[in-house]
Amino acid sequence: MKIIESDLSNQIVAFVQNKLGNIFFFNHIAVIELNEGIHFNIKNAPVILNELKAYFGEIRPFGVVANRINSYSVDLLDTAKYKATLKNLKSYGVVGHDAASKMNATIESSFCEAEKVDHDTIYDAINNVYNTVKKSKLFSLN
């Protein structure tokens, strides 16, 4: 399910569409829906990472949910580089919607420091990511 089709759509604060996909911003979370066939790697990552930095800044803690509504690939060996670019990223979640995307979410989970990043629904992912961000020491309502 696309985030725009969910009950959470009325809480979207901002929206960005670019060549890699769509980014939906909430107060402390961004939901990213990459386009079909994209290969996300360190070369094109700044397209997304710069949008996250522009919205959340360099200090404000936030979380990201990758909503795998399309089939795409991620260069997981660059995971540490993505994280180093976003020092205030406190939580990450992935939602798989079919067998292949759920398998990819599970694989992504093994490259992350979080205890569990793969989720079955967008609601579970957002709830988990938000709670992790909320518990971070730097959390602020501003």
Image: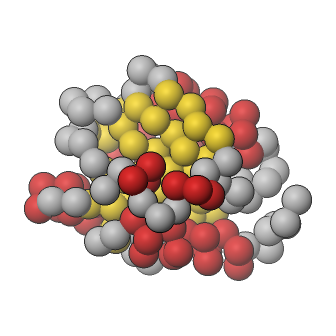
Which quadrant of the rendered structure holds the C terminus?
bottom right
- Say which of 80 and 61 sits in front: 61
Instruction: Give the mark count.
Output: 0
Q: Is residue 77 visible?
A: no
Q: Examine the image and state in which quarter residue 51 appears.
A: top right
Residue at 58% across / 56% down in the picture?
Answer: 10
Residue 11 higher or lower than 13, as above or below: below
Q: Position of residue 27 (x, y in %)?
A: 71, 57
Residue 59 higher or lower than 55, as above or below: below
- Say which of 117 and 24 sits in front: 24
Q: Position of residue 111 (x, y in %)?
A: 37, 59
Q: Position of residue 99 (x, y in %)?
A: 11, 62
Which quadrant of the rendered structure holds the N terminus?
bottom left
Residue at 22% across / 30% down in the picture?
Answer: 37
Q: Is residue 36 visible?
A: yes
In the rendered view, does 78 fall on the left or right side of 91?
left
Residue at 47% across / 64% down in the picture?
Answer: 7
Residue 136 higher or lower than 66, as above or below: below
- Say which of 96 and 8 sits in front: 8
Q: Position of residue 121 (x, y in %)?
A: 34, 69
Residue at the extreme left: 99
Residue at 84% across / 66% down in the picture?
Answer: 141
